[in-house]
Every structure is written in structure tokens, then in C-alpha cells.
Image (cartoon, grey):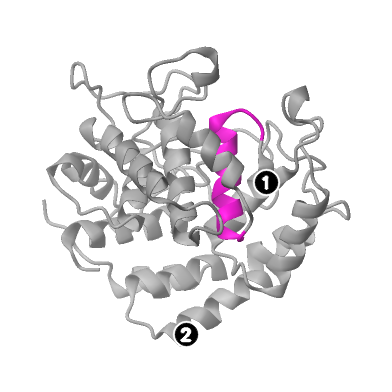
């Protein structure tokens, strides 16, 4: 497989996007100096989608009025988006917004009744939800040690996680596992003050091995490709953003890249699958969009070129080729 770099027209197109995309393009796909990357990243808090999301926070600290909901406009979902956008956790805007969440938001009415009194960053019971809370919490320097301990205790013998584990499930879920892996990586990076320990690193590596042993989208027992997940019906080979709790092969590859996992033959087929989706202009389309109310529309449509998918695909190809 030949893995090629983006052409100038694709880079210009990406850099015409929102600040949340531009700063990541500068960091991951160009040789821009660190000062230029930082200056562009600072705009996430004051311009574009990041600023619009911050402006939607209610006076009680929530988005959508709740900690979590079945749509995509709750406090948890917005914080996940702000993490994806790379909002600087040290910015005044982030400190104010996350401070309101930490001080005022609880799980009352959004999780199991026994969690009503839990503060937002204490989480609830479901591993998938807790993992997304921990991802954002670690990014924004919040104490998510309680969630981390719970997640470590819920890792299954096969190395992954499953949201049905509290109900005696013994087989892991790709969906839950990728959510937890993202959380553990952010906790590791945040350090001991947030809950990062050697146990966290070991659990993450076991979870990554779970995915790698399955070539990121195949069954371990037969080697057959998994066309759709059993819970939500999403196709793991169809690329989406935002992914929310859903797994797909690009999300897995981008995590492995971010975690610094050396690519090997176990990811080759998934990389080839992603590379084959590039169009004649060197861009990747948005292939899936999950039903639900977006707090802010990102201006991308199914079947049309997507800056988010293109950015993530290009940096995965660079990782696989050893360019960055």
C-alpha cells in the first residue's frame, strides 16, 4: 500500500475551516512553529464552534439542562466536543465553564437514582458514560480518580470493557473499550494528581491489545469482519464525527496514533480501508451521522467531504508511514 501526503489544495481547504481544525492541522500535518500552533489554538475559546458552545452554557453550569441525555447536547457531550476541539484547559474561558460544572452540576435526573447526589466529575455507573466524563475531566484538570478506579475494576478478562459489565457481561464491547481507552490516555497524560498511575498505563495497553488482536474490526474466533455493532447497528467501517459512544476503525487508529503505539501488521488492513476512502481530490467524506440534537452544527453532511475525517485520516496515514 502506498501512503501519500496531502497536497497543497487539501491543506488550504483544511486551513479554511474552524479554529478547532486549523490548530490541529498546523500541529499534526505541517511544520508550523509552536507559537503559531498555540496562537491558532487560543482562538477556539473566542471564535467559531468552541466559542458558540461555551456561550450555550446555562447559569447553573449545565448544557441542555442536564449532566447527560440521549441526545448530543448535554453537559457531557459538550465537554467531549470541547476536548475534541482542543480547547485550552488553562484558558480563562475553560476555567470558568468547567468550574461551574464542577461546583454545580450533579447527576440528578440524568443517571441511576443512587447517583443523584454525585457531582458531575464523580460520574455515574455506566462505563461508557463514565469514560467520556473522565476523558473531558482529565483534559480539564479535574479529579476523576473515583471514575478511574471504577473503570480499572471493570476491565474484563479479555482486556476490554462493556457497558453491560455491571449486569454480568463477560465479553467486551468495541464501543465501550474505545471510550475507556481515550479516557485512560488522558488520565495518564494529566499525571498522578488526576489519577494517572502505572495501573492505568497497564490497563490501557491491555485494552489496546484487545483491539489489535482483532485487527480493529474482526472477530477473534473466526477472523470474519464485524459489519455492524449489535447495540447501535453502526457500521464500524463507516467514518463519523462526532463519534460519541460509537466505535469505528478511524477512531481506533487515531487513538493508537495519539498513544504512540508503533504501527504493525495488525493495523495494516484497517489503514488500507481508511486510505481507500480518499476521493479524487484527496479528501475523505463523512459517512455516518448519528441521530440526535447537535448543540452546534459543524456544517458537514453525509456523503460530502469532511474536514474532521480528512484531518484524522491524514494524521493516521502519517503515523503509519512513520512521517510524524
For residue 291, which quarter of the picture? top right
Image: magenta residue range: 124-141
Decide which of tag 2 and tag 1 comes sooner along the chain: 2
Q: Looking at the rendering, in which quadrant would you find the C terminus? A: bottom left
The crowd level at tag 2 (other Cα within 10 Å; few <14, some 14-19, many 20+) is few
Nearest the eye: 108 or 268: 108
Looking at the picture, how far across and down is residue 170, in whole percent?
Answer: 40, 16
Per the picture, the main secondary structure of the magenta-coloured stretch is helix
Q: CB of mark 2 within 8 Å of CB of mark 1?
A: no
Nearest the eye: 143 or 64: 143
Identify the mark at residue 121; answer none if there is no mark.
1
Looking at the picture, how far across and down is residue 279, in whole percent?
Answer: 30, 52
Residue at 78 percent across and 62 percent down: it is: 55
**Residue 246 makes an appearance in the image:** no
Nearest the eye: 30 or 131: 131
Nearest the eye: 270 or 156: 156
Identify the mark at residue 36; answer none if there is no mark.
2
> Element at badge 2?
helix
Looking at the picture, how far across and down is residue 253, in whole percent?
Answer: 31, 47
Amino acid at each position: 500500500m502506498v501512503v501519500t501526503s496531502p497536497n497543497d489544495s487539501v491543506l488550504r481547504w483544511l486551513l479554511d475551516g474552524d479554529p478547532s481544525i486549523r490548530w490541529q492541522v498546523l500541529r499534526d500535518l505541517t511544520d508550523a512553529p509552536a507559537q503559531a500552533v498555540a496562537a491558532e489554538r487560543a482562538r477556539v475559546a473566542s471564535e467559531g464552534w468552541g466559542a458558540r458552545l461555551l456561550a450555550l452554557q446555562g447559569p447553573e453550569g449545565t448544557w441542555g439542562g442536564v449532566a447527560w441525555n440521549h441526545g448530543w447536547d448535554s453537559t457531557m457531550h459538550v465537554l467531549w466536543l470541547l476536548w475534541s476541539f482542543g480547547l485550552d484547559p488553562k484558558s480563562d474561558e475553560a476555567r470558568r465553564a468547567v468550574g461551574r460544572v464542577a461546583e454545580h452540576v450533579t447527576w440528578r435526573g440524568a443517571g441511576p437514582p443512587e447517583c443523584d447526589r454525585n457531582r458531575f466529575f464523580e460520574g455515574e455507573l455506566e462505563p461508557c458514560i463514565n469514560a467520556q466524563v473522565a476523558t473531558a475531566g482529565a483534559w480539564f484538570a479535574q479529579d476523576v480518580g473515583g471514575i478511574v478506579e471504577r473503570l480499572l475494576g471493570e476491565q474484563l478478562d479479555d482486556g476490554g470493557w462493556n457497558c453491560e459489565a455491571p449486569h454480568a457481561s463477560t465479553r467486551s464491547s468495541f464501543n465501550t473499550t474505545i471510550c475507556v481507552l481515550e479516557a485512560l490516555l488522558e488520565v495518564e497524560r494529566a499525571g498522578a494528581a488526576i489519577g494517572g498511575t502505572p495501573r492505568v498505563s497497564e490497563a490501557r495497553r491491555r485494552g489496546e491489545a484487545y483491539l489489535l488482536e482483532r485487527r480493529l474490526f474482526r472477530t477473534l474466533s473466526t477472523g470474519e469482519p464485524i459489519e455492524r455493532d449489535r447495540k447501535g447497528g453502526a457500521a464500524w467501517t463507516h467514518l463519523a464525527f462526532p463519534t460519541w459512544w460509537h466505535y469505528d476503525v478511524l477512531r481506533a487508529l487515531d487513538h493508537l496514533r495519539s498513544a504512540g503505539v508503533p504501527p504493525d501488521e495488525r493495523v495494516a488492513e484497517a489503514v488500507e480501508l481508511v486510505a481507500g476512502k480518499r476521493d479524487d481530490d484527496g479528501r475523505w467524506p463523512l459517512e455516518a451521522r448519528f441521530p440526535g440534537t447537535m448543540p452546534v452544527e459543524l456544517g458537514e453532511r453525509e456523503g460530502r467531504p469532511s474536514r474532521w475525517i480528512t484531518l484524522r485520516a491524514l494524521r493516521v496515514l502519517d503515523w503509519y508511514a512513520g512521517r510524524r
